[in-house]
Image (cartoon, grey):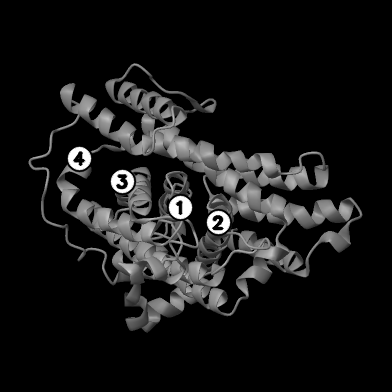
């Protein structure tokens, strides 16, 4: 017991087993919705829902244990809610890329992410990109996944005259979505930990009572097989012709870059926020940042092999920190709860997409708050940031939003007679994205 206290530095961080255990359970409740939502989103890309459920749970367990034991951080690592939507709706559905190829892109991005983290190159690349554009990317992804959520609820529908319009809000499925959204918002604002998870559960019960959802045959069951997704990312290394075709495709590089780019800033922003909230920042530096980044990138590699999209350090971890979590023992407890959740797949997978979709709207709203950090008073900053945000939902692509914003940024700063404010890497990215559009054309 004492060795555990020393390992996790309980005394130095003013915490104890009870406090850490409560924090771990709190973060689990805040993150449990991902076990429902992630398989729902990735199954829309053609992946096996049961396999993705198991892959999601195992990836969360692995990544969360790793950041807890290696970096001593009270953080949950799970498939990113923005990047799983990018995976399905931008890469697979919009670009027409097979999910197997997209998953290989996730794996390559994770390998690069790990190498860059180990060589400490990552920080240099991040520092070269203006803070305003980083916030614009986060906010843009928020709008994009919220737009997807609105579509899946039926609140937004296609219209041949106006492209989109208000959907039929009187249909039973849409009414259930609206109920889920309102209940979750009320719980969230009232301060309930795990509000998104509770909202989904309450709506599922209402759906079963009203006959919209078929009750599960059992509550506890066997763990779904990983066979449909496990090891698929390794196949290109066996088929050299397939590997060559991928590495000569400009579209593939665009996919890899976007996964890599967004994962960079998703993790960095969360680490800064969580470390600050937990009081772990020292001299404006994040202790064990390298270990935390390696934990995250390694989890993405493992997740890709198992069968899920890119992972990230989750902002929902702040719920556990609010409950007193200060050390990696919070993450260990959290992993234990996710291990138990593996056996409740029959109960968790009956939830339909119209019930999980409000979670995308709410998470999108949280991500969109990054807009407040953008310098809207300077047009040379505001215009590229605005285009980055706007074009993600309008072109149904995170990559297009980033590319257009990053193309505009050097142009607007040169026009403002501030060429010295542009980092050389940003000039290089200008030509990378220019090539991206040429190859698309």
Q: Secondary structure at mark 3?
A: helix
Q: Secondary structure at mark 4?
A: loop
Residue at the image position 89 percent from the left and 56 percent from the top = 418
Give the left or right position of residue 169, taking residue 73 as reference.
Answer: left
Q: Is residue 170 above or below residue 249?
A: above
Q: What is the quadrant of residue 438 in the picture? A: bottom right
Label 4 CA crowd tier, 10 Å (few <14, some 14–19, many 20+): some
Name the residue carrying label 2: 275
Contact between marks 2 and 3 (CB within 8 A): the answer is no
Which badge, 1 or 2, is on the more N-terminal residue?
2
Residue at the image position 31 percent from the left and 46 percent from the top = 40
Which badge, 4 or 2, is on the more N-terminal residue?
2
Give the left or right position of residue 118, taking residue 422 as reference.
Answer: left
Query: Marks 1 and 3, how far apart in space?
Result: 19 Å
Which badge, 1 or 4, is on the more N-terminal residue?
1
Check the image and name the residue furthest to the left: 217
Name the residue carrying label 4: 350
């Amino acid at each position: 017991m004492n060795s555990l206290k020393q390992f996790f530095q309980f005394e130095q961080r003013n915490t104890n087993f009870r406090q850490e255990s409560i924090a771990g359970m709190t973060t689990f409740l805040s993150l449990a919705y991902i076990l429902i939502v992630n398989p729902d989103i990735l199954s829309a890309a053609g992946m096996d829902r049961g396999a993705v459920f198991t892959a999601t749970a195992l990836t969360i367990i692995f990544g969360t244990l790793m950041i807890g034991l290696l970096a001593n951080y009270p953080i949950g690592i799970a498939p990113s809610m923005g990047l799983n939507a990018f995976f399905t709706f931008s890469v697979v559905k919009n670009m027409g890329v097979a999910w197997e190829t997209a998953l290989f892109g996730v794996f390559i991005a994770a390998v690069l992410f790990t190498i860059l983290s180990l060589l400490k190159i990552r920080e240099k690349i991040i520092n070269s990109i203006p803070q305003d554009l980083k916030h614009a990317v986060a906010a843009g992804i928020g709008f994009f996944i919220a737009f997807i959520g609105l579509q899946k609820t039926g609140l937004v529908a296609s219209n041949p005259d106006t492209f989109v319009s208000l959907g039929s809000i009187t249909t039973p499925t849409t009414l259930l979505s609206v109920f889920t959204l309102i209940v979750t918002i009320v719980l969230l604002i009232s301060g309930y930990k795990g509000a998104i998870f509770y909202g989904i559960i309450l709506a599922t019960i209402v759906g079963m009572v009203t006959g919209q959802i078929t009750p599960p045959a059992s509550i506890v069951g066997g763990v779904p097989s990983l066979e449909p997704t496990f090891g698929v990312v390794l196949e290109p290394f066996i088929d050299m012709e397939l590997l060559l075709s991928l590495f000569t495709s400009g579209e593939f590089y665009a996919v890899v870059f976007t996964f890599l780019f967004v994962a960079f800033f998703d993790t960095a922003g969360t680490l800064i926020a969580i470390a600050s909230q937990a009081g772990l920042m020292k001299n404006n530096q994040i202790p064990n940042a390298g270990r935390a980044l390696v934990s995250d990138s390694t989890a993405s590699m493992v997740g890709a092999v198992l069968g899920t999209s890119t992972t990230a350090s989750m902002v929902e971890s702040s719920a556990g920190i609010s409950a007193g979590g200060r050390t990696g023992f919070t993450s260990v407890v959290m992993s234990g709860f996710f291990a138990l959740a593996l056996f409740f797949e029959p109960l968790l997978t009956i939830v339909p997409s119209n019930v999980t979709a409000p979670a995308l709207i709410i998470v999108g709203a949280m991500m969109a708050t990054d807009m407040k950090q953008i310098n809207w008073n300077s047009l040379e900053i505001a215009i590229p940031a605005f285009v980055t945000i706007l074009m993600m939902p309008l072109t149904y692509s995170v990559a297009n939003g980033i590319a257009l914003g990053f193309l505009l940024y050097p142009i607007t700063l040169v026009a403002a007679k501030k060429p010295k404010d542009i980092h050389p890497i940003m000039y290089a990215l200008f030509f990378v994205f220019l090539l991206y559009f040429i190859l698309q054309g």
